[in-house]
Image: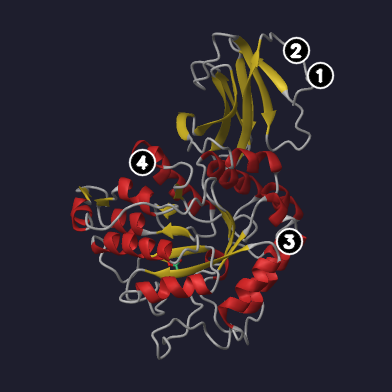
Amino acid sequence: MKCGLIIATVGFLAITNVTLGLDNGLARKPPMGWMSWERFRCITDCDKYPDECISEQLFKRMADLMVSEGYRDAGYDYVNIDDCWLSMNRDDNGKLVADPTRFPNGMKHLADYIHSKGLKFGMYQDIGTKTCAGYPGMKDYFEIDAQTFAEWDVDFIKIDGCYADEIQMVNDYVLFGELMNKTGRPMLYSCSWPVYQEYNGIIPNYEILKKTCNMWRNWGDIEDSHSSVETITRYFSDNQERIQPHSGPGHWNDPDTLVLGNYGLSYEQSKSQLAVWTVLAAPLLLSNDLATVTPEIRGLLLNKEIIAVNQDALGIQGLLVKTINKIEIWKRPILPRVKDELTQAIAFVSRRADGAPYAVRVKLIDDLGLSNKTYINGYKVIDLFDVTRKPFFVRMDGHFETRINPTGANFYKFVPKLNIILRGVTDTDY
Ligand code: GLA
């Protein structure tokens, strides 16, 4: 699928008369929140599935749970509607209309409710003639739709790319972004054009992308399985040299939603998705039923240390740096910086399913690429999944050993330490 990639310059030439520039000041850190698609898809039969259908009730229920279960206070603050919220027809003025049965009070009412909970409100539309599920798209209605979203007090807008030409869509995304900016309401802009271009063998123009969108879907839809998580992860490692440099504060690569808390991932596999998404500086948008998330998965999602790594102010997307016997080592530089050395978040991600936890023993310099040579003799290591967070120390010339459960991940923070040889675990500056 990827052979014969062509650069999407055609689109670029065609839009040079449009002002580029995303100046909404949003998404300085990877956005966090909740989004309906993966878990609730396009369930519209509220008689049969009253707790699951895409409806005002569902989003109110999720907003309530975001607060009562502690997600909002941990930083998850967007509540986003995905596809299937629309009526099949616009009104007489060409304005979008929410399905009147499922959203009887309209979208402004729902926005007000979500805002009253201290949360932000996200919506979905499509740059083409229809949404992916077949509801009316935005083509030919960009201005009125941007205005409508602003009137409804929307804070986040995901624009999909079904039923649109994958070259022409770039101009349209840029234009819609301009029109959103013109409304005066800052709305986080999530774009999907890279995935449509990549699927058609076109390399997206990242310069336009990051000036236009706050985040963008790079690859296909996540599903409720570890193999789906692995497929997306593999896209990110296979293409990391090309895509990694373009992610950063204000503009993020998006591997799609977190599916922890659903049916498909074991506890170990949940750790794996969370660790990889955190290293990737990915948006953390949950797609699950917050009412049925088990306490142990909730514990993972609310892990403060891991969230802090994801939200690190440098906003550097991490990389797969080495694979040893099917254990992938993913590394992301984060703050604090000690002298010239940054802290590193390092995930050991197992692609092994052969049974029994598997131990790897690595050298700090040769295998992990840690280079704390000048001032320092070692690193303080914190196991991010260990809630006791008892640090331990490794010397620069030493080894680090960790044992990863099948299909799981271990995740550590390596903080450079000045002038230590082995200080033991009495360190108090953690
Ligand atoms: C596409 C997107 C998904 C979701 C659906 C909705 O497949 O990639 O994330 O928005 O459309 O129909």
Are circles 2 and 1 on residues that touch, CB within 8 Å? yes
Above or below, comparing residue 224 to residue 409 in the picture: below
Q: Residue at x 76, y 38 (%)?
A: 387
Q: Quadrant of residue 278?
A: top right
- Left or right: residue 168 versus residue 345 is left
Q: Type of residue at label 2? A: Arg
Distance between the Cα atoms at labels 1 and 3? 36 Å
Where residue 268 appears, as percent x and y from the top left, is 64, 45
For ligand 1, the image quadrant comes to: bottom left
Where residue 228 appears, as percent x and y from the top left, is 48, 54
Q: Earlier in the sequence, mark 1 or mark 3?
A: 3
Residue hosting label 4? 239
Q: Earlier in the sequence, mark 1 or mark 4?
A: 4
Q: Type of residue at label 1? A: Thr
Residue hosting label 1? 426
Q: Residue at x 75, y 32 (%)?
A: 389
Distance between the Cα atoms at labels 1 and 4? 42 Å
Residue hosting label 2? 423
Q: Type of residue at label 4? A: Asn
Above or below, comparing residue 286 to residue 398 in the picture: below
Where residue 161 appears, as percent x and y from the top left, is 35, 65
Disc 4 residue: CB within 8 Å of ligand 1? no
